[in-house]
Image (tube, helix red, strand yellow):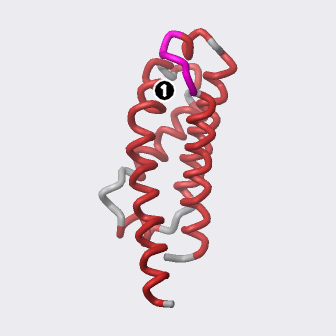
Amino acid sequence: MSKRNTAILTKIVEEAFALEQILNEIDESAFLANDLIVRATCMTLINVGELIKNLNEDFRVSHSHIPWKDIAGFRDVAAHGYFTLRMDRVWLYATKEMPVFVAQIKEILHSENESLSHTE
């Protein structure tokens, strides 16, 4: 894997950690009632989508089990259709789908680190 892709994946994991901190110890009703948390969550998800768009196509194809297009597409909806965005869907995406996605990213990074340690 290229250094660029590794750096992008690492940044995605960092964004996911930030999202965990934003949503720490709140439930959906608290999320929906707090405009600052909603905005911070949306911006973090936009950042993740933008990062995905910077991964090279060969990498995304070689890891096609990950729904890159859907995740990046969420970025487009959040960035360009914010006023039509359903915040209950943002909550579900941030709390249910993102953790699965990030676990997949961590597995890729772990596999890459394992591969590098065997070649050294």
Above/below status of 46 relative to 85: below
10 Å crowding of disc 1: few (<14), some (14-19), many (20+): many
How many numbered discs sit on the rendered protein? 1
- Residue 49, given in percent of the width and then of the height, sits at 54, 47
- Residue 38, given in percent of the width and then of the height, sits at 61, 22
Q: Which residue is mark 1?
A: 90
Whether residue 67 sits left or right of residue 73 in the image: it is: left
> Which residue appears at 45% of the width and 18% of the height?
88
Residue 15 lies in magenta, yes or no?
A: no
- Residue 51, given in percent of the width and then of the height, sits at 58, 54
Q: Report which quarter residue 41 is drawn in.
A: top right
- Residue 57, given in percent of the width and then of the height, sits at 45, 67
Above/below status of 72 relative to 8: above
Label 1 sits on a secondary structure element that is helix
Front residue of 21/29: it is 21
Whether residue 64 sits left or right of residue 4 in the image: it is: left
Whether residue 63 sits left or right of residue 88 in the image: it is: left
**Residue placed farthest to the bottom in the image?**
120
Above/below status of 70 relative to 81: below
> Which residue appears at 54% of the width and 60% of the height?
9
Magenta segment: 24-29
Above/below status of 47 relative to 58: above
> Identity of the amino acid at label 1?
Val
**Residue placed farthest to the left in the image?**
65
> Which residue appears at 45% of the width and 40% of the height?
98
